[in-house]
Amino acid sequence: MKSGRQTAKLLKVIAVLTGAVGTANLIGGIWLASLGGSPFYAAAGLTMLASAFLLWKRRAAALHLFAALVLATMAWAWAEIGVDWWPLVPRGDLIFLFGLLLILPWTVRRLAPAGGWVRNAGPLAVALAIAGIFGLAALMRDVHNLDGTLPGPRSTIAAEPNAMPDDDWQAYARSWRGDKFSPLTQLTPANVGKLEVAWQLRTGDLKRSGDPGETTYEMTPIKVDDTVYLCTPHNRVIAVDAETGRERWRFDPLIRTSARNMQHLTCRGLSYWDSSRAGASAADCPRRIFLATNDSRLIALDPRTGAPCRSFGRAGTVSLLPGQPHYNGGWYQVTSAPLVAHGLVVTGGAVYDNISTDVPSGVIRAYDALTGRLVWNFDPGNPDSTAPLGAGRHYTPSSPNSWSTPAADEALGLIYLPMGMGAVDQWGGRRPATTERFATSVLALDIVTGRPRWVFQTVHHDLWDMDVPAQPALVDLDLPGRGRVPALVQSTKTGNLFVLDRRNGKPLFPVEERPVPGGAAPGDRLSPTQPFSAISLMPAPARESDMWGATMLDQLYCRIRFKSLDYKGPFTPPSLRGTLVFPGNFGVMDWGGISIDPIRQVAFAHPNYVAFVDRLIPRAEMEDQGVRGPAGGSDRRGSDEQGYNPNAGAPFAVDMNPFLSFAGLPCQSPPWGYVAGIDLRSGRKVWEHKNGTIRDETFLPIPFKLGVPSLGGPMSTAGGLTFMAAAIDNYLRAYDTRTGKVLWRARLPAGGQATPMSYRSRASGRQFVIVVAGGHGSLGTKLGDHVIAYALPRQP
């Protein structure tokens, strides 16, 4: 008797839960249908409510009605997304779960004591079995992978004057070609599985109170002779033995940090210069390590001792603040390695995004590598005058900046700069013509004079924070019918890969200007067209059926949000209602860029697909809420890569956030991250695979390979391997460059949002691969201070 009462109570609990989910689906479904979305949720909610009523009345008809719902859900899912497991899960998870509870024998007995289980529960059991087979077929089938094989070696690399030894890695991307390619061949697909930890270092530099939220390890070390040099977020420089990792010296510039006034705290790399190669003569420090700091200094260090080179600037330091107008401590930082070429040290800088329309200049400056003397300055607001700025004068405020890493072709006498936007990003009603010319572009400057030689814009009148984020990659391509052409390959946040003739900036593969959505915010204007490259990893436009979630209700929430936002495809302008920005400002490809194998003439990319939502906030609304921003002396939440951005001086602030479900998952269905192989001779994407798991993003360490976002970069080798640790699960992976297959992986103690590098130790002859695992404040990966070197075991 007691068991029967408990069964009756459980049946009522199931009825109540079914009714609750049905009510939520009905209300949300009616809302969605009113927005022009799918009517399925309203119909499913009504069916679940009817089933709940019949369950409460203990009618067996509830089972038959639910069987019809299961079959209808399966047919609807099939019509929307086909046989695809992860998008399928939230469409039927709750319905399938309730169905399983309803066919349990004790449930059926309380509903229909006569007639037997087969007669009453059989139809529902059959429907669940069909749905289960459909789900199993989806689980077994991967519709997101593109299999293929890139070509093998096609050419040899022409010898460069004063080329570095193959053993070394002397610049951020090994050389100023920006290809992130090592000519070493000891590690191959056949032996990479034997890699083991050779040495490990803890830098001791961890996030401190008073540091900005985006405190990150994004560093790629350099290696010269028998020493590896690395930097930390607080710009400490550490030199270690390349074979053992034993520390040799450490330099601390004692930078000043501010959580309020700094947007980032990172050091992506250092630069090396040998004066004898440049035909120069230094009184001290004939070789130099150059460090650019977060508090706006350029420092030259002796690579043997770590002591400042006193002949450079003032006792080894040049301030980057002279000439900067409206400077607010921390609003101008240098986060990337300075370029060193032709006896010059060239650096741009990162300017605080979306804090104000009145921010420091994006000026690019070249200093004499021996003395620290300013040789030229390119001010995007005054591009025709590059002579050093005189005392008491100022560069143009709020002009486009170059915060990432430049590239150089000394034979052509050109440096190539990836350019960002002038202040501010999401509203451009007052931008001057110079900003419109140079923003969001690849800019080629004469290395001797700093004068612009050509500019190629990747987004016109950029309102989406589509800064050109990555170092340009230089490669000589053997193009059919054109012979060997000096090319520049530029990866972008939009997903376009622009392949240009680096002599003149002309596209080597077609670039088409296509019409894009209109509807500018009050006081703004739009470009009627945007450039689209024939080589592209840009995603297809988002659809309602692409929405995802942890459960059926979570997915319904995302569908309602999607239909409530302004979205007409790529380049839909920001609006007061809220705009879906896809690709989002996180970018299909960010500062980590791509790696290029110049022998095979192929590229390795890692595209991401995460949407953002931008909503413009009128100034009057901000003032009503007591949010005034810097101009008013108060800023409730500050400014960052996401969240509230005050845009002081503009008529609108902006609220900018990832497009997430109620449960905090991306509203778009996975995969969110891939790796891809591109044949640069044909411009064809040959293979593409989901990359990374959710192991480190869930409470349980479940390594579901959904394909997750990555931030950092790949590094390729002549041995046919590419290494990358950028995904938000904590692994370093080795891929077969030709196929994209993962051949080896190593668990990291923290997030690996950095680009690996490789060198050969002269002590043992072994090829090493180094990765930094320090985590990333914006992505929320585990923080740390680890530098890890891998190599094959020592031979006895």
Image: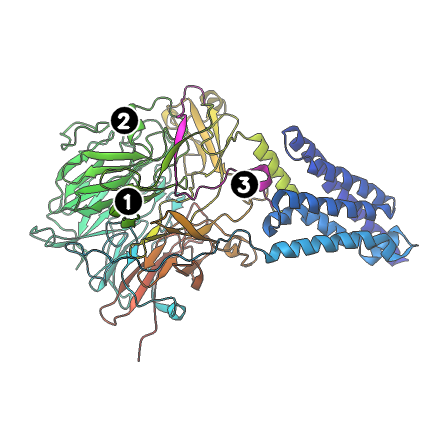
**In front of the other: 340 or 633:** 340
For marks 2 and 3, give the one nearer the viewer.
2
Q: Do the residues labelled 3 and 1 touch (CB within 8 Å)?
A: no
Q: Residue at x 88, y 56 (%)?
A: 4
**What amino acid is labelled 1 in the image?**
Leu
Q: Whole-percent x and y of residue 378?
A: 20, 33
Q: Is mark 3 on a helix, strand or loop?
A: loop
Dividing the picture into quadrants, the one containing residue 107 is bottom right
Residue that numbered label 3 is attached to: 660
Q: In this view, does 776 lie above or below 434?
A: below
- Disc 3 or disc 1, which is closer to the eye? 1
Q: Name the residue under label 1.
A: 488
Q: Name the residue under label 2.
A: 434
Q: Position of residue 698 (x, y in %)?
A: 55, 53
Residues rendered magenta in the picture: 521-549
Name the quarter where the N terminus is drawn.
Answer: bottom right
**Nearest the camera: 455 or 164?**
455
- The alpha-carbon separation of the residues under discs 1 and 2 comes to 24 Å
- Please identify the dominant SS of the magenta region: loop
| Foreground tag (1 vs 2) | 1
